[in-house]
Image: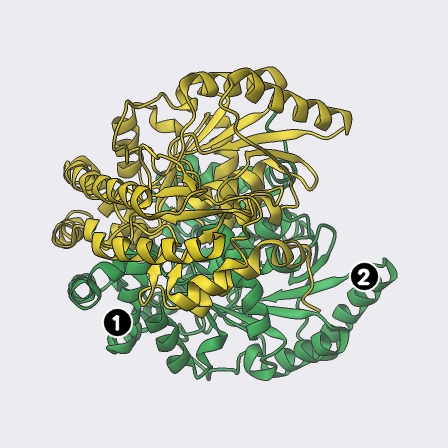
Chain colours: A green, B yellow
């Protein structure tokens, strides 16, 4: 009686393995490189307490009433000012996950094509899948011409099939899961393709402000503001418990998001939005962000040096210039899903790379998070994982 | 380039008129019987401030981290205890609007039938519409047999068309927009039909605890716990700014909601959930609810007496035993949508009943909210509205 497209499509493909890990173990009792949690050390508890009290004084009942579907003006204006965009291009979302979901909902009909990188963010793939999108994952190639050709090939195929590409979903900064970024040339190439072929780009950038080395690269949005929906999150620069993010896009697109969001949840949480607005405008967000960057840079550097020291031959990894993740590649034939049992029994967790690949490749890869655990636990966890891998690969 | 089913279906039908009102006027500057806002007087500001501080002390970083998709255990347990249901049947939702949307998403394929009352809640109709559901509104009839026959007729029609009824959406307690409730016999009849014909019931009960007279009637969920998804909200018993609600249902259904909610927004706001849990278990919610009931009963009584005193002949209205709304019926030929201009120009707002009717009937009806404005403003507003109506109808 309860059967439906959603349950069929999603359960069979994505759900079980990932959920099962989190069901099987208490992530606090093991060395967890799984998940994408920021460190609780970065949450400025006393400043949040003070800000909350200030919000109650300043807004009284208004902070607990229904509010505008677009988000409270104070937060929209604070975001607009900080990122240099007009306020009419800012929509507050109840988490950046909602941003992804809403874009799919307003743009994608069953069978429509969504282009993604291969691998890409699992939560986005899950949302696309639930709308019965036809997901085409395209692997990165360091050669720009080859990379472009890969896209053009898929675009020709899609056209030949009489289908429509609705958007390209991309995380250009410190991608989840790979930790890698797109170069400026790659961004320009993709934006040109989008303009030429008439599809949108959904640019998901939750980690953008967590850069530990190198120079900021312009957003895809800045290259083509009318062709890109730019999604951001407060989860990684403030705290995920507020479930707040935002979308920056052409007002015509935001208008459709508005209608959609009304039937989703009417408006984002009001009190939380005022707290975020105060945090942003008071400068507390920037102070806190600087501390977070210091903390995470230390953890990333540690992880890189531990991998260098302990990993067996044949294992390679990415060098993320920011964000929360690093991607590990084991020799061909290694199966990271099968290896779960060994790893979890020994007390270490990761997410198998396969789940991030729309084409189900990447069986020999895994995603490691370095933001959540302390330096001590990262050290012990990598020693343990390296031992297990050495035994498995040998 | 941005065209899609969602925008087509929803904009054309529901969107413009309602949105336009709220765009045209500042609801604080006019007499607003539109909206469904609770009174800010009912928000216990100092108790919320104290509770927030306690939550920070008690949960520290955990209150600002990601949390379980089902909701934090403390809130699920508090809800389970208060309403006498097993905790595994409780899912916290990011607003009860999300509860409605999620049910539709997991159950309804395009063209599937949803039965509703006629009229019914606009936000639900909007969500159903966005999933391209085939909505069949069935008007209430005071005679139980006639009422049942109306349902049976629609069920036969749907069967003859080879379509499937996925669920019946019903607000049995102090319905939005009518303010009326279903009798126990009517609830039993509908539950029997659902069991017999194999469809679910989505029982939306945000106002249930706001009863001003009469006895509580058992929920439809209590009559058939495995056939009913029971939706509730903190918006009317605590504060809407937290955007929290909950669903009570069979674990198999919650399991599908779980998967869906992961791709919607991962989890409900964490800090807000802890605040709600503390509020509930400390007894503060009950104290506050008692004060809200007192306040709203006074406003309802006042509105009823004002209507009696001021409304011209030919205008009738419902007698809500609870909730936030009352429904006004003008003589045949009256057009509440056309009357907007007159009313808004004079400074009084309502929502035209037509928008709540899936069959677009009810042109001579309007919904009046009595929770939001003060008694003084309700008094002045009704005098004004009655004058305008007298002039229009005469």
Single out the mark in the foreground, 1 or 2.
1
Looking at the image, residue A59 sits to the left or right of residue A148; the answer is left
Determine which residue is flagged by label 1. Answer: A278
In percent of width and height, residue B99 lies at: 45, 41
State the SS at label 1: helix
Q: Residue at x 27, y 53 (%)?
A: B378
Looking at the image, residue B51 sits to the left or right of residue A12; the answer is left
In percent of width and height, residue A238 lies at: 32, 65
Q: CA distance from mark 1 to mark 2?
A: 47 Å
Q: Residue at x 41, y 52 (%)?
A: A33
- A245 or A268, which lies in front? A268
Image height of A98 relative to A337, above or below:
below
Image mark count: 2
Q: Residue at x 51, y 19 (%)?
A: B143
Tell me, yes or no, if residue B278 can be seen here.
no
Q: Residue at x 56, y 40 (%)?
A: B104
- Which mark, residue A19? none
Report the chain holding disc 2: A
State the SS at label 2: helix
Determine which residue is flagged by label 2. Answer: A158
In the picture, residue B89 is in which quadrant? Answer: top left
Q: Earlier in the sequence, mark 1 or mark 2?
A: 2
Looking at the image, residue A287 sits to the left or right of residue A71; the answer is left
Image height of A249 relative to B353, above or below:
below
Tell me, yes or no, if residue A74 can be seen here.
yes
Q: Are marks 1 and 2 on the same chain?
A: yes
- Please tell me how crowded label 2 is: few (under 14), some (14-19), or many (20+) other residues with Cα within 10 Å: some
In percent of width and height, residue B256 lies at: 53, 35
- A287 or B268, which lies in front? B268
In the picture, residue B274 is in which quadrant? Answer: top left
Report the chain holding disc 1: A
Image height of A31 relative to B111, above or below:
below
């Amino acid at each position: 009686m309860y059967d439906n497209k959603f349950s069929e499509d999603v359960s069979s493909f994505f759900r079980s393995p990932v959920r099962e890990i989190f069901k099987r173990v208490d992530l606090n009792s093991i060395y967890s490189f799984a998940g994408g949690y920021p460190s609780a050390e970065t949450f400025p508890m006393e400043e949040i307490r003070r800000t909350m009290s200030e919000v109650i004084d300043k807004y009284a009942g208004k902070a607990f009433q229904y509010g505008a579907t677009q988000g409270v003006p104070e937060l929209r204006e604070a975001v607009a000012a900080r990122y240099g965009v007009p306020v009419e291009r800012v929509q507050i979302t109840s988490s950046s996950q909602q941003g992804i979901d809403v874009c799919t909902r307003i743009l994608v009909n069953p069978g429509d094509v969504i282009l993604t990188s291969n691998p890409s963010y699992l939560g986005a793939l899950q949302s696309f899948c639930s709308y019965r999108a036809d997901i085409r994952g395209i692997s990165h190639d360091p050669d720009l011409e080859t990379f472009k050709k890969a896209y053009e090939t898929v675009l020709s195929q899609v056209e030949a099939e009489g289908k429509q590409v609705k958007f390209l979903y991309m995380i250009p900064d410190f991608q989840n899961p790979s930790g890698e970024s797109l170069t400026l040339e790659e961004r320009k190439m993709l934006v040109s393709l989008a303009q030429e072929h008439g599809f949108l780009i959904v640019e998901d950038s939750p980690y953008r402000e967590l850069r530990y080395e190198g120079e900021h690269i312009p957003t895809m949005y800045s290259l083509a503001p009318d062709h890109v929906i730019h999604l951001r999150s407060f989860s990684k620069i403030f705290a995920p418990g507020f479930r707040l993010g935002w979308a920056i896009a052409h007002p015509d697109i935001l208008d459709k998001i508005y209608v959609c969001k009304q039937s989703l949840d009417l408006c984002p949480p009001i009190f939380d939005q005022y707290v975020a607005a105060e945090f942003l405008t008071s400068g507390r967000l920037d102070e806190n962000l600087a501390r977070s960057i210091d903390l995470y840079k230390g953890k990333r550097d540690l992880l890189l040096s531990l991998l260098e020291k302990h990993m067996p031959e044949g294992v390679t990894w990415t060098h993320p210039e920011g964000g929360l993740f690093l991607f590990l590649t084991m020799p061909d034939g290694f199966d990271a899903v099968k290896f779960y049992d060994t790893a979890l029994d020994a007390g270490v967790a990761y997410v198998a790379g396969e789940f991030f690949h729309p084409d189900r490749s990447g069986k020999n890869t895994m995603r490691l998070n370095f933001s959540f655990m302390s330096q001590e636990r990262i050290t012990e966890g990598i020693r343990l994982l390296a031992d297990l891998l050495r035994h498995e690969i040998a």
